[in-house]
Amino acid sequence: MLKQDLSSPPKGFGGVFDFVLRQGSTGVIWLGAIFVTAWSMWLISDIVFNGWAGLSYDFLTHTPTNAGREGGIAPILVSTGLVLAICMAVSFPIGLGTAILLSEITATDSWWGGMIRRSLDVLAGVPSIVFGLFGNAFFCNILGLGFSILSGGLTLACMVLPILIRSTEEGFRAVPIAQKLGASALGLSRLSTLFYILLPIAVPGLIAGFVLGVGRAVAETAALIFTSGYVDRYPESWLDSGRVLSIHIYDLSMNIAGGEAHAYTSALVLLILVLLINQTASHIGLRYLRRGVT
Amino acid sequence: MKNSKRYLNLTIALLFVFFLPATSFAAELKGKLVLTGSSTIAPLAAEIGKRFESLHPRVRVDVQTGGSSRGVADARRGLADIGTVSRALKPNEQDLLSFTLAKDGVAIIVHQSNPIKKLSNQQIIAIYQGKIKNWKTVGGNNRPITVINKAEGHSTLELFLKYFGLKNSQIKPHVIIGDNEQGIKTVAGNPNAIGYVSIGSAEYSATHNIPIKLLPMKGVPASIKNVANGTFPLSRPLNLVTKVVPRGLAKEFIDYSLSNKVHDLIQRQYFVPINP
């Protein structure tokens, strides 16, 4: 009886109209969900289907030849890893610090905090090519780093900082006020509160920020083509130019006749790389979470 | 007499012993050479660079892209040792020195299913100006024409405009593309499209099951062969440009690039070698 009461349309509307509206909206929601899932499945299966055949140990361990149509992507993987490492090594501490400043030290409604937040939101919306041109002008030319892994990593760091800071800040905001009050009631210092109370709870936000940041960084082409560059040999130092995976894929698919097959395989490698990084990040995060709470 | 000759030989030998290490050290090329510019030339320049590096292990050749205009700008400002420019230098760029590495042709391409066999220059101009909007007008199917143009800064665009006496503002494009492969993919995916791309890439794609067709220009079939023998009208030089007379490493690299030792590399990138 109760069940029937819940499912019957409320009084006041025409029963049939309401029924159609309800069923219709359910249908639209399902359609949307199916469309999104099907679309991403199609995209992933297209890459896997076209790229799987070329994926081999040799592909991962050899240098590209004939403009990337033949050979492998070993130096490109090395450059990608280095650029990503610099980007994260620079942006993570700065991002964490700024997020702590924003959420724990400045008042929510302070002018200063508002200014930082607004400028971060503006930065987050800036197209990546603008970061690329800025990086080229500032790091490559003014600081004299030239086309280099270092320029690329630093440019990327500037680009992922807004995302990193905002999602880390959200993580800190998720900490219940009762916990902070409890910590001060117990006479814990600010630093101890941060390390033993805030950080463990904020870890999911941190991980989300890290994963989003890495995702944006590893997929970046426009910001890197003018900073870390196009050179596809093994980098010998931080100051060498090195081509990253996304630029390699872009060049093979858009500039090299007959580069399609290797473009697909490189895209597959990129896909696997992103999944691996995400999995590792959340794994480490979960372990830290468990350790912190107990 | 004989004795003095022996002394002379000894002196020469001693000179060699003392100076050879020094001279060979000076003659051994080392350092970094930076090339920036045309995205069309970049893969070829990178391949030549790799072969050059393998001959001179202490040399690094860094190739960057960004378009021919950037090649000119960087060579001028000294940001690059050599600029790469995939067109002839303009009158206001005559302060630079240019060295033609190879040639490339630009082909007008349509979808393979398009029944059009050829278009006159006037017809192409009218299509790109938006005056002819339907394939029916030029003897094709009753379908609207999708005009594909290249983005600013690409030398294919400049060559196309110059050849047909057009200004970019007169063109009414439906799609604007960047690199060659993007143009080929767009035409292959749209039976009503018309575009223009590098002949090398187009010929490769057309012979590798990509559904595109290269239209002849003034009756000359669009092919690498006809660019090589100079009969195909719509062609362009691939240039290395420098601000000053090249010396040292830059000179060695340019000399090597213009030699017949890189012909196989040029052909593998679907361009046409011209230097003997």
Image (tube, coloured by chain):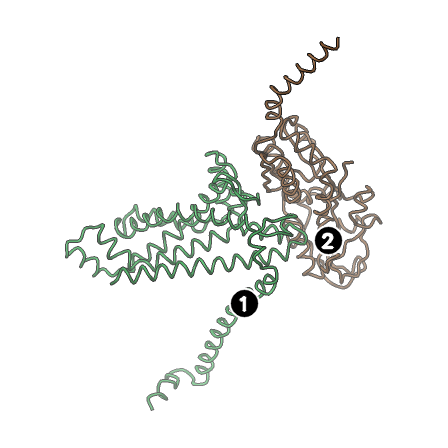
Chain colours: A green, B brown
Tell me how many marks there are. Answer: 2
Q: Nearer the viewer, residue A216 or B192?
A: A216
The chain containing the residue under callout 1 comes to A
Does the rendering let one see residue B129?
no
For badge 1, the amino acid type reads: Trp
Q: Which dot marks residue A39?
A: 1
B78 in relation to A71, above or below = above
Discs 1 and 2 share one subunit: no
Quadrant of the snapshot with the C terminus of chain B: top right
B276 in relation to A9, above or below = above
Q: Nearer the viewer, residue A292 or A160?
A: A292
Judge left or right: residue B204 versus residue A227.
right
In three-dimensional space, the C-alpha distance between marks 1 and 2, rounded to whole angstroms, equals 31 Å
What residue did someone put label 2 on?
B204
Q: Residue at the location (64% across, 52% down)?
A: A70
Q: Which dot marks residue A14?
A: none
Q: Nearer the viewer, mark 1 or mark 2?
A: 2
- Tell me where residue B123 appears, x and y as whole percent: 78, 51
Rate crowding at label 1 as few (under 14), some (14 to 19) or many (20 or more) other CA atoms within 10 Å: few
Q: Residue at the location (72% across, 52% down)?
A: B202
- Tell me where residue A145 appears, x and y as whole percent: 48, 36
Q: Nearer the viewer, residue B120 or B200?
A: B200
- Tell me where residue B94 appears, x and y as whole percent: 68, 29
Name which quarter of the figure residue A282 lies in: bottom left
Q: Residue at the location (62% across, 54% down)?
A: A253
Rate crowding at label 2 as few (under 14), some (14 to 19) or many (20 or more) other CA atoms within 10 Å: some
